[in-house]
Image (cartoon, rainbow, N blue to C red):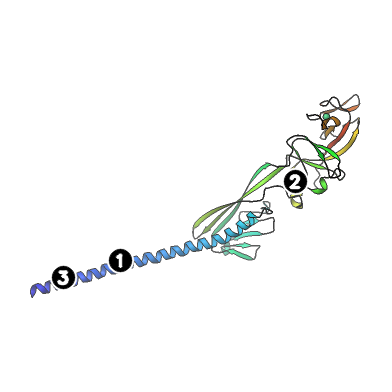
């Protein structure tokens, strides 16, 4: 009997110990489970808020007609050519579209950065070429120049205009978003090919300010006695059939191209035209 009682006591103690251990394990498990659930929640919030902004920016950057207006864009404000503006408001921890629509919430920080790379415009002539306008009139475009993309600058009678070393500007958008302490960086290459939109007044004015422009003045194959402006580019009549850049000077009282067998008959000249208000 004495022995049995001892065994029973040991069993009771073991039972109690086992219960304590099981309870302990259960507590650890449930704490971990709850912690994981919280982590999952914060991860989900990050994903949802990030995705909302991401979807919008993909839509904006994939639109080939859309560009970023760099002059108006800041670290916290992103302005697109189509008029859409995205702004991070720190006090609200939110990103808004056009000041009114909340795109993403719970944002601790959000910055916009635009990278631009320049490349030669495809319309820049690699060699001197003869240009015939819509009405059949002829001009000669020197190497390194591009005819304006603006329709009223393409007709000789209206004043044909060329631009020196026109360039395209490809844009890349880098967005850094911090949600629940975690930063995410996403990059968007704009589908726009970076060419100047000549029908957009702002871009046209910018091109006029940025590049040297020259306007074609027809000289009707006549002989001239005076070089009006040394900045002008003269094109002699022989230029259309011969290679080499025209080099003119007044020889024996006549404007003479020494590159092309001392030709004195001038087809036309490119007059430097850099005014920005027309
Ligand atoms: Zn010449």
Kindly state the secondary structure of the residue where label 3 is placed: helix
**How would you rate the neighbour count of disc 3 (Cα within 10 Å): few for under 14, some for 14-19, many for 20 or more?**
few
Residue 215 at x, y percent in the picture: 83, 41
Residue 223 at x, y percent in the picture: 91, 30
Residue 107 visible in image: no
* Quarter location, residue 63: bottom right
**How would you rate the neighbour count of disc 2 (Cα within 10 Å): few for under 14, some for 14-19, many for 20 or more?**
many
Nearest the viewer among 249 and 124 is: 124
Q: Which callout, 3 or 2, points at the residue further toward the start of the chain? A: 3
Kindly state the secondary structure of the residue where label 1 is placed: helix
Which residue does the numbered mark 1 point to in the structure image?
25
Residue 30 versus residue 193 in the image, above or below: below
What's the CA distance linking mark 1 and mark 2? Answer: 72 Å
What's the CA distance linking mark 3 and mark 1? Answer: 22 Å
Which residue does the numbered mark 3 point to in the structure image?
10
Residue 274 at x, y percent in the picture: 80, 42
Residue 168 versus residue 223 in the image, above or below: below
Q: Which callout, 1 or 2, points at the residue further toward the start of the chain? A: 1
Q: Which callout, 3 or 1, points at the residue further toward the start of the chain? A: 3
Residue 45 visible in image: yes
* Quarter location, residue 221: top right
Q: Are marks 3 and 2 in contact (CB under 8 Å)?
A: no
Which residue does the numbered mark 2 point to in the structure image?
207
What's the CA distance linking mark 3 and mark 2? Answer: 94 Å
């Amino acid at each position: 009997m004495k022995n049995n009682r001892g065994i029973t006591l040991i069993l009771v103690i073991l039972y109690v110990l086992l219960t304590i251990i099981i309870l302990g394990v259960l507590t650890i498990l449930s704490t971990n489970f709850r912690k994981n659930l919280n982590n999952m929640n914060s991860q989900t919030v990050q994903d949802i808020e990030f995705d909302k902004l991401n979807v919008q920016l993909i839509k904006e950057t994939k639109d080939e007609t859309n560009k970023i207006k760099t002059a108006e864009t800041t670290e916290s404000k992103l302005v697109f050519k189509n008029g859409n503006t995205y702004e991070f408001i720190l006090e609200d921890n939110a990103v808004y579209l056009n000041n009114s629509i909340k795109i993403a919430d719970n944002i601790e920080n959000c910055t916009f950065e635009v990278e631009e790379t320049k490349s030669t415009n495809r319309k820049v002539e690699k060699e001197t070429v003869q240009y015939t306008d819509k009405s059949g009139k002829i001009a000669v475009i020197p190497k390194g120049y591009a005819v304006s993309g603006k329709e009223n600058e393409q007709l000789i009678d209206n004043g044909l205009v060329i631009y020196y070393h026109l360039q395209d500007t490809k844009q890349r958008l880098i967005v850094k978003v911090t949600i629940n302490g975690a930063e995410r960086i996403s990059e968007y290459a704009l589908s726009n090919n970076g060419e100047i939109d000549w029908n957009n007044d702002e871009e046209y004015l910018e091109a006029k300010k940025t590049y040297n422009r020259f306007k074609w003045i027809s000289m009707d194959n006549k002989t001239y006695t005076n070089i009006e402006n040394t900045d002008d580019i003269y094109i002699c009549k022989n230029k259309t059939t011969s290679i080499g850049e025209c080099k003119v000077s007044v020889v024996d009282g006549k404007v003479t191209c020494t590159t092309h067998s001392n030709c004195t008959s001038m087809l036309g000249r490119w007059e430097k035209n850099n005014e920005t208000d027309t």
